[in-house]
Image: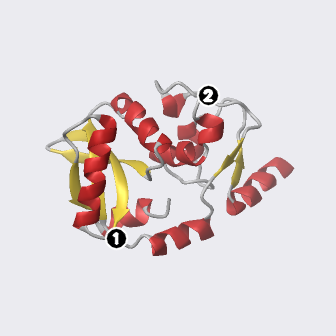
């Protein structure tokens, strides 16, 4: 009824009202939001004031309070971002075979204002969750940011990569 209409209209304008029992992953998965549960870091990052206090374990599956209004990237905003961020260079911060190993890294990067996202890759038959930050104009810019991220997180296995056009279309709008 009218509730569905409200949701449809509001997602076009960049606001989503949480229903009881919904999670970051379930909201991100909605066709009228991002259509992909892996895009939960985008919701988290854009709503740190409301969500930043949540415990990081099981972050994407943690139930959110109904009625909370979350800011989401509207379709027009997404188009603008894509044009503003044409570069394909990214920092691959961390790769993990278990999803729960990425939650705290995503939270820390989001809280430090990094445009962090999670993507998956199949390498030699194993599914990897990749925590990435992008998109940069050139390798030098990405490498400088990679050094800052390594220092921030106290890790050493991050590397710079050139994403393909599909990954760019999928994530640069956020």
Which residue is found at the position 58% from the left and 49% from the top?
46
Up-down relation of residue 129 to residue 81 (above or below): above
User: What is the x, y in percent for residue 11?
Assistant: 69, 57
Query: How many marks on residues?
Result: 2
Which residue is found at the position 19% from the left and 40% from the top?
157
Q: Nearer the viewer, residue 57 or 2?
A: 57
Q: Secondary structure at mark 1?
A: loop
Q: Is residue 4 visible?
A: yes
Left or right for 169, reference 73: left
Q: Residues within 10 Å of mark 1 (few under 14, many from 20)?
A: many
Q: Nearer the viewer, residue 159 or 42?
A: 159
Left or right for 98, reference 62: left
Up-down relation of residue 80 to residue 142 (above or below): below
Per the image, the residue denoted by label 2 is 63
Left or right for 22, reference 100: right
User: What is the x, y in percent for residue 32?
Assistant: 63, 55
Which residue is found at the position 70% from the left and 49% from the top?
16
Question: Given this view, does label 1 or label 2 mark the residue nearer the observer?
Answer: 1
- Locate residue 143: give its quadrant: bottom left
Per the image, the residue denoted by label 1 is 87
């Amino acid at each position: 009824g009218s509730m569905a209409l409200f949701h449809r209209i509001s997602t076009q304008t960049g606001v989503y009202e949480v229903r009881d029992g919904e999670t970051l992953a379930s909201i991100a998965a909605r066709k009228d939001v991002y259509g992909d549960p892996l895009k939960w870091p985008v919701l988290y990052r854009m709503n740190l004031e409301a969500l930043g206090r949540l415990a990081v374990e099981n972050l994407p599956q943690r139930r959110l309070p109904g009625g909370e209004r979350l800011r989401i990237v509207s379709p027009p905003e997404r188009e603008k971002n894509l044009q503003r961020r044409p570069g394909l260079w990214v920092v691959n911060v961390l790769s993990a075979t278990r999803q729960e190993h990425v939650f705290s890294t995503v939270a820390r990067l989001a809280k430090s204002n990094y445009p962090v996202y999670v993507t998956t890759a199949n390498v030699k038959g194993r599914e990897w969750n990749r925590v990435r930050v992008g998109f940069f104009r050139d390798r030098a810019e990405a490498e400088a940011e990679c050094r800052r991220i390594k220092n921030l997180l106290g890790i050493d296995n991050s590397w710079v990569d050139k994403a393909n056009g599909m990954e760019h279309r999928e994530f640069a709008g956020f």
